[in-house]
Image (cartoon, rainbow, N blue to C red):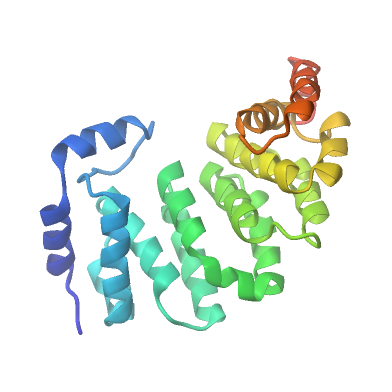
């Protein structure tokens, strides 16, 4: 079934709630595209429909990056559609430059679960995203590692990659810090020494400690130590000039 740009735009407008658009936009500082106000579950449902139809033509012709929802929908279709890993790898590479906010980044990353079947192939590319000079490419790399590589064999090289990254903005810093906090929650014995030795850029260290304290999964007996580690960071970030 062929889906046109008019079809998708009409569906999005039908599902849109203007009041939601204003509220959601307020949560995404620096939003660069118009927001229609479509809830994420509705976008996921539409993406699954497109993924079962002629999704390649839809990506090529029916999903220009004109609104927040169209960009989000594009990423979700790439996640849901059936294809081999090489094609998904290529489409994701083309999609990453379209990411300009945390919402699209994090939602699409969580949808790309097929990556778990091909971790060895994806790993080098995700490290290259962390080395990018673009804020949201770095966040994408961090979020993908957090969502799909939190395994015993990947935890140490993941922490090494985060420690070597020079974040290019707050949302990159927060993405890496969030990933470090999940590393701590899932593998505290491995991650704690990295925090005690202040191996991460100071901004990431402070944010990671904050996220660890906010997590309900952090043991109570660990919280005083994490608070102390957060206070020990110098105000001048010598690791991230």
Q: Can residue 35 be seen in this view?
A: yes
Residue 154's quadrant in the figure?
A: bottom right
Q: Position of residue 133 (x, y in %)?
A: 60, 45
Q: Where is residue 21 in the image (x, y as percent from the top left)?
A: 22, 39
The N terminus lies in quadrant? bottom left
| Closer-to-camera residue (161/232) | 232
Residue 77's quadrant in the figure?
A: bottom left
Q: Is residue 97 above or below residue 235?
A: below
Residue at horizontal 27 percent and vertical 61 percent from the top: 64
Residue at horizontal 49 percent and vertical 66 percent from the top: 92
Residue at horizontal 59 percent and vertical 35 percent from the top: 174
The C terminus lies in quadrant? top right
In the visual, does 43 lie left or right of 189?
left
Q: Where is residue 235 in the image (x, y as percent from the top left)?
A: 73, 14
Residue at the limit of the structure toward the front, as seen here? 220
Task: Say how many tags the image has.
Answer: 0
Q: Where is residue 41 in the image (x, y as percent from the top left)?
A: 31, 55
In the visual, does 183 lie left or right of 116?
right
Residue 11's quadrant in the figure?
A: bottom left
Q: Is residue 101 visible?
A: no
In the visual, does 205 lie left or right of 7?
right
Residue at horizontal 61 percent and vertical 35 percent from the top: 216
| Closer-to-camera residue (63/110) | 110
């Amino acid at each position: 079934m062929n889906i046109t740009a008019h079809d998708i735009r009409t569906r999005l407008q039908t599902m849109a709630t203007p009041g939601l658009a204003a509220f959601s936009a307020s949560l995404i500082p620096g939003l660069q595209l118009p927001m229609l106000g479509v809830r994420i579950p509705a976008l996921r449902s539409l993406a699954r429909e497109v993924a079962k139809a002629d999704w390649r033509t839809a990506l090529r012709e029916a999903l220009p990056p004109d609104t927040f929802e169209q960009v989000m929908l594009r990423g979700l279709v790439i996640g849901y559609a059936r294809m081999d890993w090489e094609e998904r790898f290529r489409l994701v590479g083309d999609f990453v430059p379209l990411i300009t906010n945390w919402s699209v980044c994090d939602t699409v990353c969580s949808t790309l679960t097929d990556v778990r079947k091909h971790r060895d192939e994806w790993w080098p590319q995700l490290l290259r995203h962390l080395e990018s000079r673009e804020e949201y490419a770095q966040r994408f790399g961090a979020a993908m590692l957090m969502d799909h590589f939190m395994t015993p064999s990947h935890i140490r090289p993941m922490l090494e990659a985060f420690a070597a990254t020079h974040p290019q903005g707050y949302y990159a810093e927060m993405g890496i810090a969030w990933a470090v906090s999940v590393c701590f929650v899932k593998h505290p014995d491995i991650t704690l020494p990295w925090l005690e030795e202040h191996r991460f850029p100071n901004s990431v260290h402070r944010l990671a400690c904050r996220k660890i304290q906010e997590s309900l999964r952090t043991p109570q007996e660990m919280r005083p130590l994490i608070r102390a580690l957060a206070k020990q960071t110098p105000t001048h970030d010598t690791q991230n000039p």
